[in-house]
Structures are given as structure tokens and as C-alpha cells.
Amino acid sequence: MAKQKIDYREGVRIVDALSWFGKVQLTRLLENIYKEGWVSCPDTYLLSKLDKKVEELKEVVCSGNHPEIIRKCADVANYGLIIADKYKQSGG
């Protein structure tokens, strides 16, 4: 499949979305900064937490509560970040 070109406006929209959502993610991480780190957490634990967050997101999407949907999206993304960072830390 050939790569699709993205026009300038779409590129700006993507950058804006990443910038905004990154701030949402950071806010959620800072709200939970009191918790222990994740580097020593077993993969099974992190994956189960990710699954739980996905289930919570599925439930809240039907509610129409936009701020809560955004928070749950950030939680899901943050568990992806945590798992990726764990592998980056171990030489990935």
C-alpha cells in the first residue's frame, strides 16, 4: 500500500492534536505521581491494567461525558507509554 500524502493543514491539525493530548496525558500522569514506578512491574500486570482502562473507556464513551472520555483516553495512552518506556529502558 502506497503512503498517503498529508496536506499542510492536516499536518498542522495532527501536530495540534498531539500537543493538546500530550498535555492531557501529562496531567493524568502527574495526578498519579505518588504511585510507584513501572519499570519493575511485570508485563502481565501492566497489560491487565491496560485492558481495564480500555474497558473503562468503552463504558464511558456511551455516556457522552466528553471530559471523562478524554481522561480515559489519556489513561489508555499512558499505559501504552508505560509499556513502551519499560522496553525502552531495557534496551528496546
Image (tube, rainbow, N blue to C red):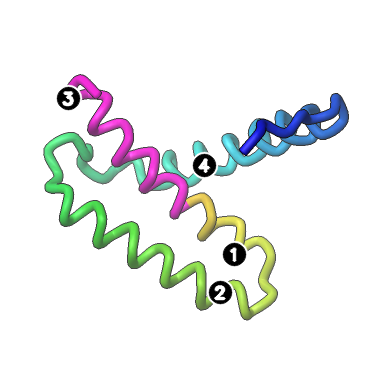
State yes or no: discs 1 and 2 in contact (Cβ < 8 Å): yes
The one nearer the camera, 5 or 26, is 5
- Residue type at mark 1 is Glu
Residue assigned mark 1: 68
Crowd around label 3: few <14 · some 14–19 · many ≥20 (10 Å): few
Instruction: Name the mark nearer the viewer: 2 or 3.
Output: 3
* Residue at image point 69% right, 75% down: 64
Crowd around label 4: few <14 · some 14–19 · many ≥20 (10 Å): many
Q: Is residue 13 magenta?
A: no
- Cα distance in 3D space between marks 1 and 3: 33 Å
Work out whether mark 4 precedes mark 3 in sequence or the reverse, and give the earlier one: 4
For the N terminus, the quadrant is top right
Residue assigned mark 2: 60
Instruction: Name the mark nearer the viewer: 1 or 3.
Output: 3
Instruction: Name the mark nearer the viewer: 1 or 2.
Output: 2
The magenta stretch is 75-92
State yes or no: discs 1 and 3 in contact (Cβ < 8 Å): no
